Image: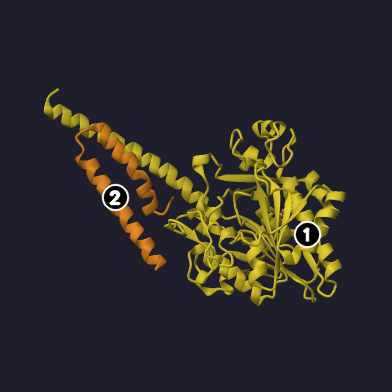
Chain colours: A orange, B yellow
Amino acid sequence: MNQAVMLLYYATTAFFAAMMAWNFARAKDAQKALLYLVVLMPFVMRLLRLK
Amino acid sequence: MKKSEQGKTLIAAKAAGLVAWAAVMVFAGVAFRQHRAWKEPVVLGPGVTAVRSLHEWFAPLKGTENDCNVYVLDSGLPGSTILVLGGTHPEEPATNLAAELLVENAKPTSGKLLVAIHTNRSASTVTRPGEAYPQFYSIKTAWGQKKYRMGDRSANPLDSWPDPETYVHYPSGQMLAYMDIRNINRTWPGRPNGLLCERTSYGFMQMIRKEKVDLVIDYHEAELEYPVIGTIVAHQKAQEVAAMVSMDLSASQFRIGMEVSPRTLHGLTHREIGDFSDATALLFESPEPFLDRVRGATNEALLLTGVDEFVQRAGKAGLLYWPIDEKGWPIEVRVGRHIATTSKVFEVWNLLYPEKPIAVDGLPGYGDLAAKGVGAYFADPASVAKDRVAFE
């Protein structure tokens, strides 16, 4: 059960990371694009199991 | 600006942003990875007869970050079995250093010692960059600097995630803060199907029962703003031992208090080990100004010297529960308090339970440790055979 919940959290993290990357790619405003990159950092760190 | 030029500018800004992002990710990622993977060598002293793993008492821990080493120092003669826990909270370095000092120097002549240097090993693989904690600290020795991971109070979220909204302690049902599910000193006596720290506590309880441990000593450090400091917290079964040790040490070496474990505060070693096994338990607290909220620069120097002008000022204003002066609370004094208190516990234990003695040679006295430093008692891993070195 604990494992299943943890996997769901990783799936959620991957979903938000993908959305953030998608938003970055489609952004028409440079400032917003940079903001998406900054927000993306912790999601990628967790997916790579670094932090 | 034309549309095509705007598009080119946007692409250039995004490319520059991506390069900067990748650089930050690599820099931070390498630093986090190096910290998590750092191995601390431990030279097995003359008393060490075996190095076991916690999973030998509870198999599901095998392969987890908390499958810590358990050092066995067996005299081969009858007597008490005593378990010493270092690194319950790895942001309290005097605890793992004192446990390591035991492993490298202690030689039991009756009874048996079991020592865990990193009780919550996972918590030693993460630190608090947001609070400016250093990633590492080093202890000066005669053969060079010995480098250690600086840890956190709770297990690494990489190993135990997510936390519950509210942590309900098993079996008491007491409600605790969500992050305390990763604080191993809130998860005793543990449960076999819980989260990582609950399983780790359960593994230690299995060891305590199977090895017929008589006494558990849990090393800690505390901020000077916290009332439980410079003291021994005792399960009621160990009241006599703690009281005699407190009186003797306070009269002869340094001030140390004694208090009885609250019966309704759950999850802690000094409560649950005594309640759920035949063993009894003591918890030692030494002063660590690094943990005080009013501290100034948070760095390795503060961690090791315990000197901080803001904590001193708080002391002068009467806001602390423990004294501090310009000498601070250096690491050798803090480790010295733990080792001297442990030695005195053995002495008093033998007076009260002569039929189950514990006698240990090789431990430095408080004065020697404070004068020579902790590093004087750590051997060079390069100077001994490979099979006499373990890694934490």
Q: In this view, does A39 lie to the left or right of B177?
A: left
> Contact (CB < 8 A) between labels 1 and 2?
no
Q: What element carries label 1?
A: helix
Tell me the CA gap for discs 1 and 2. Answer: 53 Å
Q: What residue do we see at 81% from left, 66% from top?
A: B349
In percent of width and height, residue B295 lies at 61, 35
Give the label on residue B40, or none: none
Q: Name the residue under label 1.
A: B242
The image shows residue B349, relative to residue B37, as above or below, that is: below
Chain name for mark 1: B
Pick the front one: B155 or B97: B155
| B222 to B355, vertically: above or below | above
Q: Answer with the quarter of the image where residue B74 lies.
A: bottom right
Q: Quadrant of residue A49?
A: bottom left
Which residue is pictured at 35% across the width and 57% down the height?
A: A10
Dot 2 falls on which chain? Answer: A
Residues behind callouts 1 and 2 on a single chain: no
Mark 2: few/some/many CA within 10 Å (<14, 14-19, 20+): some
The percent position of residue B333, horizontal first and vertical second, equals 75, 46
Q: Which residue is drawn at 66% across and 49% down?
A: B221
Determine crowd level at label 1: few under 14, some 14-19, many 20+ residues with C-alpha closer than 10 A. Answer: many
* Mark 2 lies on residue: A16
Q: Which amino acid does label 2 sit on?
A: Phe
Amino acid bearing label 1: Ala
Instruction: Look at the image and tell me whether residue B51 can be seen.
Output: no
The quadrant in which residue A7 appears is bottom left
Measured as percent of width and height from the top left, residue B269 is found at 64, 62
* Left or right of residue A35: residue B148: right
Can you name the residue that lies furthest to the top here? B1
Q: In this view, does B330 lie to the left or right of B125?
A: right
In this view, the residue in front, B62 or B210, is B210
Q: Which-is-in-front pick, marks 1 and 2?
A: 1
